[in-house]
Image (spheres, rainbow, N blue to C red):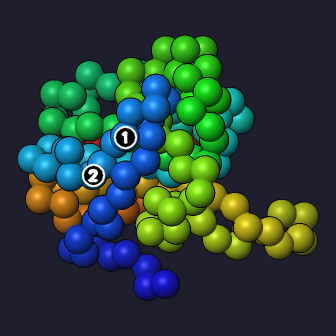
Amino acid sequence: MNELKIGDPAPMFSAPDQDGNMVTLEQFRGKKVVLYFYPKDNTPGCTAEACDLRDNYEKFMERGYVILGVSPDSEASHRKFIEKYKLPFRLLSDVDKKVLEAYNAWGEKKMYGRSYMGVLRKTFIIDENGIIENRFDKVQTKQHTKQIFEG
């Protein structure tokens, strides 16, 4: 699959949020979207990233952004993660990995010399017309907001 580039149309998707409500990219036409892909709820890096976005949520709102997190975790796992860390944004459950694959955020990873398939931590900034405005493949979990705004 070809890598998505800045200027490409963002792939359309639909996936349930933490409450089972279907979310589509089309729903956010006219707003900027921070679409971030992360491996797993309640893990150190993913928690640091989510909390950094949470702590700067007002700045995103002031600039007209919507934040959506995506991982293959279940809706129930997302609900617990949101409650535990008081996350003000929606998390999408992509158990079948269709959204992850559409954004090339599912692929080969290596750890301790072993290869395995997993979530590639990436963030896409999608403009009001559904076009990829920026992308981050090397996410700085503890300073992701700064990375996005300075992008």
Q: Is residue 87 above or below residue 109?
A: above
> Disc 1 on helix, strand or loop?
strand
Residue at mark 2: 25
- Relative horizontal placement of residue 144, taking residue 110 as reference (left or right): left
* Viewer-side residue, 132 vs 149: 132
Image quarter of residue 11: bottom left
Residue 47, visible in the rendered structure = no
Residue at image location 62% in from the left, 37% down from the top: 74
> Disc 2 on helix, strand or loop?
helix
* Viewer-side residue, 20 vs 31: 20
Indicate the position of residue 92 as horizontal and vertical percent values: 47, 41
Q: Is residue 97 above or below residue 19?
A: below
Residue at mark 1: 22
Q: Pick the quarter of the image with the C terminus.
A: bottom left
Indicate the position of residue 10 as horizontal and vertical percent values: 28, 66
- Relative horizontal placement of residue 28, taking residue 99 as reference (left or right): left
Residue at image location 49% in from the left, 46% down from the top: 70
Q: Is residue 135 above or below residue 68?
A: below
Label 2: how many Cα within 10 Å (few below 14, some 14–19, many 20+): some
Type of amino acid at the residue the image marks with label 1 = Met
State how far apart marks 1 and 2 are (Cα). 10 Å
Image quarter of residue 28: top left
Residue 108, visible in the rendered structure = yes
Label 1: how many Cα within 10 Å (few below 14, some 14–19, many 20+): few
